[in-house]
Amino acid sequence: MPLLAELEALPRTGCLPTARRETKLRSLMEKVVIIGSGCAGLTAALYTARANLRPVVLTGRQPGGLLTTTTVVENYPGFPDGIDGYELMVRLQKQAERFGAQVRFGSVEAVDLSRQPFALTVDGEPLAAETIIIATGASHRHLGLESEHKLENKGVTYCATCDGALPPFRNQPLVVVGGGDSACEEALYLTRFGSIVYLVHRRDTLRASKIMAGRALAHAKIKPVWGSVVTEVLGLEQDKVTGVRLKNVKTGTATALDCAGLFIAIGLIPNTHLFKGVIEMDETGYIIPREGTATNVRGVFAAGDCVDKVYRQAVTAAGLGCAAAIEAERYLAAKNE
Ligand code: NAP
């Protein structure tokens, strides 16, 4: 019987079985478990693997993280011609695996950080860890409209790279919502497919970096719609997006815009709900580190987009992943001295 199955088969109550379970758990203990396989997680894996700690990386439902859904990454150092986001993450995983990182497809359902070793449940299976690096990243923010929810995957999407080339969007008017780098990137990508791309933003200046904003606004196919918010996604009766209802935030005037696709790019929310009430975080869910990447729980470190709401770049996530790995390694060395 495989070890994990054997552990599961042990009764959970009673003095002797519980003690046996603890002993078994210790025998299954990993030195480092990294939750998340984006830039932060895989960089932490690379560093802890090179420190001979044989880290386990739990991929989550999106192996490689959000970067796998982007097209060309132009600002990651070392790639003068840019690199495809998916390819970058595949290379990073291979690099970590070369030194002994164990990348496992799986999502963490529960964690118990109240005792050592820390206990995790991964797709129903137990896992024990001496240290944990939280690198769970962030997910796309939603507008929060009922019609948005009902028409998700029926014309409402959060990823132009994943869905932009689909037949319903070809040669059709498309709407992108947002004013940041993501919205500009999505809009530019969609110009390959749509007849026109409306960039709907709630203010009248873009938040995006100058280079991205300049490119988007200079593109003949991109038409900005300033000072406007989407109040409803139209097409419920047809069971597909046919347009959006907009409201001008200054005048309150309502208008409708025909479109076949609504691409929402209004930022990110950190994936930290699993640690709520245990790991210190701010009111928006970003983890607040105590010192460096250390959290309020000794032996638990955090890195990447689940911590950083200021820079949120691939390279800063990688940097934080490196820092978390070094701190985890030092923590283990001090603990086992
Ligand atoms: P972001 O920079 O936080 O921008 C979010 C945008 O959505 C803002 O313009 C915001 O409006 C708008 N917004 C937020 N909530 C909204 C709502 N409920 N309704 C309507 N609009 C709303 O997020 P991001 O563009 O996803 O970028 C995240 C990070 O990744 C940034 O640090 C960015 O630089 C980075 N990134 C970089 C690249 C690149 O370098 N190529 C590409 C993508 C992302 P306000 O402006 O009014 O706040």
Image (cartoon, grey):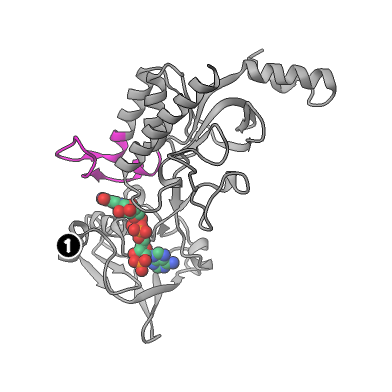
Residue 322 image position (x, y, % from top left):
37, 32
Question: For the residue labelled by badge 1, is the local secondary structure a helix, a strand or a loop?
Answer: helix
Residue 123 vertical placement versus 314 (above, below)? above
Residue 280 vertical placement versus 241 (above, below)? above
- At x 54% / y 31%, what residue is drawn? 299
What residue is disc 1 on? 214
- At x 40% / y 28%, what residue is drawn? 326
Ligand 1 appears in which quadrant?
A: bottom left
Q: Which residues are magenta?
A: 65-88
Q: Residue furthest right?
A: 14
> The N terminus is located in which quarter?
top right
Pick the front one: 323 or 149: 323
Residue 226 image position (x, y, % from top left):
29, 75
Pointer 1 residue Cβ closer than 8 Å to ligand 1: no
In the image, what residue type sits under mark 1? Gly
Residue 120 image position (x, y, % from top left):
61, 31
**Crowding near the residue tagged with mark 1, few <14, some 14–19, many ≥20 C-alpha atoms within 10 Å:** few
Pick the front one: 161 or 333: 333
**Quadrant housing residue 296:** top right
Residue 323 image position (x, y, % from top left):
38, 34
- At x 46% / y 65%, what residue is drawn? 143
Question: Is 330 covered by the magenta stretch?
Answer: no
**Quadrant housing residue 171:** bottom left
How many marks the image carries: the answer is: 1
**Residue 265 visible (yes or no):** no
Question: Is 83 covered by the magenta stretch?
Answer: yes
**Residue 21 visible (yes or no):** yes
Query: Does 143 sit left or right of 258 as displayed?
Result: right
Query: Does 105 sit left or right of 181 as displayed?
Result: right
